[in-house]
Image (tube, rainbow, N blue to C red):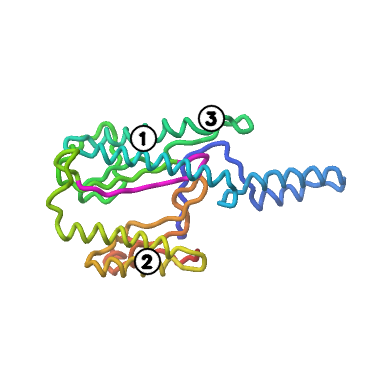
Amino acid sequence: MPPKERAIPYKNRKSVSVYHHHQLQESMSDDESSTGSVEENVAEEEVEAITDLSNSDVCTKYQEASKIVNLALTGLISQCIPGAQILDLCNFGTTIINTQAMKLYQKKVNGVAVERGVAFPVCVSVNDVICNHSPLGSEEVEPLKAGDIVKIDLGCHIDGYISVAAHTLIVPESPDSPPTSISDEMGNVAVAAYNAMLVAAASIKAGATNTQVTDIVTKVASSYGVNSIFSVRMHQMKRFVIDGVKEVALRHPTADDLEAGGGKVGECNF
């Protein structure tokens, strides 16, 4: 079964589909004025449907979402100190994203408010929890302590144009002191992840395949003597879609991965 796209909630979106275009064509009469009117309507919708970076307004929305994400991430990093509650951190990041996003694009478009705010929940995952940990208020979670390894994930969107960010840190003894007692293994993992990210970003280009990117990430991990996590993947993003159908695995599955229920990522081109 092919992977399904995972979209962020939204309402009142406008798009032009091939099916919709055919419906318009089939409903046209022989009257020239009617034909001209329908063609004009289609042309107007097609202008609205330009959602790639050739549209300067789209670029601006991505940039504004990125600024908000970086602001929230910077604030969260400063709050990761001994005793900090994970739920408080998640709420803190969410408040920054929503507050800053609501300051932008306040004017309605065709009578409809521009949707903006959280695109991916603020997640604070500690130690052996890999990612996507955003606890409910009813959950009891231990506060952070010095030496904890914390992974932060979050995302913001402006009108469906999504920016996400992530960061890994070690909780210091105090806000003003750097983390201590970092093992060689932890250092290797951190540097490998950073360099793999750079190499992967440079490798994702027109004509390349996702398996080529996976091969490169695997080579980087191997050079540092560490392993990539099979269940964590990169995803294509589109407007209002945070997990598109194009995926990149961080490594190829082993027999044990497949036996445990992990699926092999289908090959795709960029």
Quarter of the image with the N terminus in it: bottom left
Does residue 144 appear to the left or right of 89 in the view shown? left
Question: Crowdedness of circle 3 by 10 Å Cα count: few (<14), some, many (20+)?
Answer: few
Is residue 253 placed above or below 148 in the rendered structure?
A: below
Residues under labels 1 and 3: Cα distance? 19 Å
Q: Give whichever of discs 1 and 3 has the lower sequence position.
A: 1
Front one among 195 and 226: 195
Task: Based on the picture, tell me whether residue 188 belongs to the magenta stretch.
Answer: no
Q: Position of residue 188 (x, y in %)?
A: 21, 61
Residue furthest out toward the left: 181
Residues under labels 2 and 1: Cα distance? 32 Å
- Which of the 4 image quarters holds residue 76? top left
Q: Give whichever of discs 2 and 1 has the lower sequence position.
A: 1
Question: What amino acid type is highlighted by mark number 1?
Answer: Thr
Magenta-colored span: 157-170
The nearer-to-camera label among 2 and 3 is 3
**The label number, if any, that marks residue 94 in the structure image:** 1
Does residue 84 appear to the left or right of 240 in the view shown? left
Query: Which residue lies under the disc numbered 3?
Result: 106
Task: Based on the picture, tell me whether residue 166 belongs to the magenta stretch.
Answer: yes
Is residue 15 placed above or below 244 in the rendered structure?
A: above
Is residue 55 placed above or below 212 in the rendered structure?
A: above
Q: Position of residue 119 (x, y in %)?
A: 43, 41
Query: Quick one: SS at disc 1?
Result: helix
Front one among 11 and 181: 181
Question: What amino acid type is highlighted by mark number 3?
Answer: Gln
Q: Position of residue 6 (x, y in %)?
A: 45, 48
